[in-house]
Amino acid sequence: MTVEPSMNPRVVRNILFVLFALPGVAFASWVSRTPVIRDILHASTAEMGIIIFGLAAGSLLGLPSAGNVISRIGGRSVILGSALLIVIGFLIVGLGAAFSFTSIVFVGLVIFGSGYGTAEVALNVEGSAVENQLNKTLLPAFHGSFSMGTLAGAIIGSGAAAVHVPVVVHFGAIAVIIAVVTFYLYRYLPRGTGKEQDVSSQKSGSNIKAQLAVWKERRSLLIGVIVLGMAFAEGAANDWLPLTMVDGYGVDSLTSSYMYGLFVAAMTIGRFTGGFILDKFGRVPVLKGSAVLAAVGIILVIWGQYDLLAGLGILLWGLGASLGFPVGLSAAGDDPRGAAIRVGAVATIGYLAFLVGPPGLGLLGEHVGLLHALIVVLIGVIVAGLISGAARPVGMREKK
C-alpha cells in the first residue's frame, strides 16, 4: 500500500528531527572507533589523515551535485538515496576493519562521505522549507538533533569499545538501524521540496551565472569565512579529539571516547538552547561570544597540561562551536531573493571545512603533534569572531 506523505509541517518537522540525527549517529560511531581502527590497520597519524580524507573526498562528490539533483527529483528522494549510500559505505568500512584492509576502509569512507554530504544538503533544504512554513527558527534545533545523534553514536561507540564489540558488528548494527528508520519515515516527507518544475527548460549558462554570482558578494563571502572557521573547529574535534587525547594526554581509548562524548554533549546543549539565546541577545553578540568560548576551550586543550583542564576546554570548545554553522545558514538566507543559492554556497563552505580541514590537520599533526596542530583551528575561530559583524541581519544593514 502506498502511503501518501503528510503535508502537515509540524509532522514533517518532527520527522526531520529524527532524520537529522541519523547521520550524526553514523559519524560519531566512526569517530569513536578510530583509535581501535588505527591499531587494527597499524596506521600512523599521517596515514590516518589520508584514510579520513576518504570521507572528505566522498563528501566533495556529494556536496556540489546535491543541489542540482534536488532541483530535479526533490529532497525526499535524495534523502532516501543518500541514506542508502551511508549504509553501504558504513558496511564496507566495517568489513575493511574486520579484514585489516586499509584500501577497503578508504573506499567505504568515500561512499559513506558521498551519502553523508548529500544528505546534509537535502536535510537543510527540507529544514529551511519547514522554517518558512512555520515562521519559526528551527535550523539550530535541527542541527542540535544532529548533535543528539552524535551523542548517541558516541555513547554506543564507547560502550562497544568497553565490551570489545568487533567494529564490523558495531557498524553493521548501526547500518541496519539507519536503513530501517529512513525507509519508514522518508515516505511522510513532501514530494516536491526543492524541486524546480522547469529546471530542464532553463538554460544551463544562466543557471551557472546565478550560482557563481554569489561568490562575488562581500557579505556572503564573509559569512562563508565565519562558517569556515567554526565548522573547522567542529570538524577537527569530531575527527581528531579522541586521538588527540590519547596521543597528547596519554589517556586510554575508552577515556578518549568519554571525552569526545563530553564535546558532543556540549554541542547538543548549545544548539538546543541556541534559539532562546539568539532571540535574547542577537546574532552578532552570540557569534562573538561563541568564538570566545571556543578559543578559550581550544587553548585549554592545547596548553592545559592536565586532564581536568583539558576536559573543561573540551566543554567550552563544544559550546562555542555549536552555533556557528546553523547561524551562518540563517544569515545567508536573510534576503529572500537568491536565498537558496546563498544558503547552498555557505553550506558547501561549511561542509568542506568540516570534512576537508581535519585530514589536513592530521598531516600537520604528523610533524608538530596533534595538540600543536590545533593552533590552526584556534586561528580560524579567532578570525570568525573578528568578522562576525558580517552576519548582522540584512534589515539592520545599509543597503547599497
Image: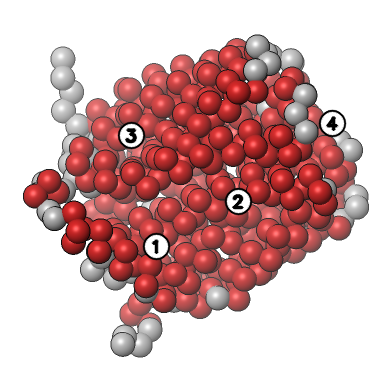
Q: Quadrant of residue 212?
A: bottom left
Q: Nearer the viewer, mark 1 or mark 3?
A: 3
- Front residue of 307/110: it is 110
Q: How many marks?
A: 4
Instruction: Give the answer, above or below, for where 310 lies relative to 224.
Output: above
Query: Percent position (x, y) of residue 168?
Result: 61, 14
Which amino acid is tagged 3? Answer: Ile
Q: Residues within 10 Å of mark 3 (few under 14, many from 20)?
A: many
Mark 1: secondary structure: helix
Q: Percent position (x, y) of residue 172?
A: 54, 15
Looking at the rendered image, the disc whose residue lies closer to the viewer, 4 or 2, is: 2
The label shown at residue 252 is 4
Q: Point out the tag, 3 or 2, that comes first from the N-terminus.
A: 3
Q: Give the mark nearest the N terminus, 3 or 4.
A: 3
Q: Quadrant of the N terminus?
A: top left
Looking at the rendered structure, the kind of residue marked 4 is Asp
Residue under pointer 3: 79
Quick one: 46 or 214, which is closer to the camera? 46
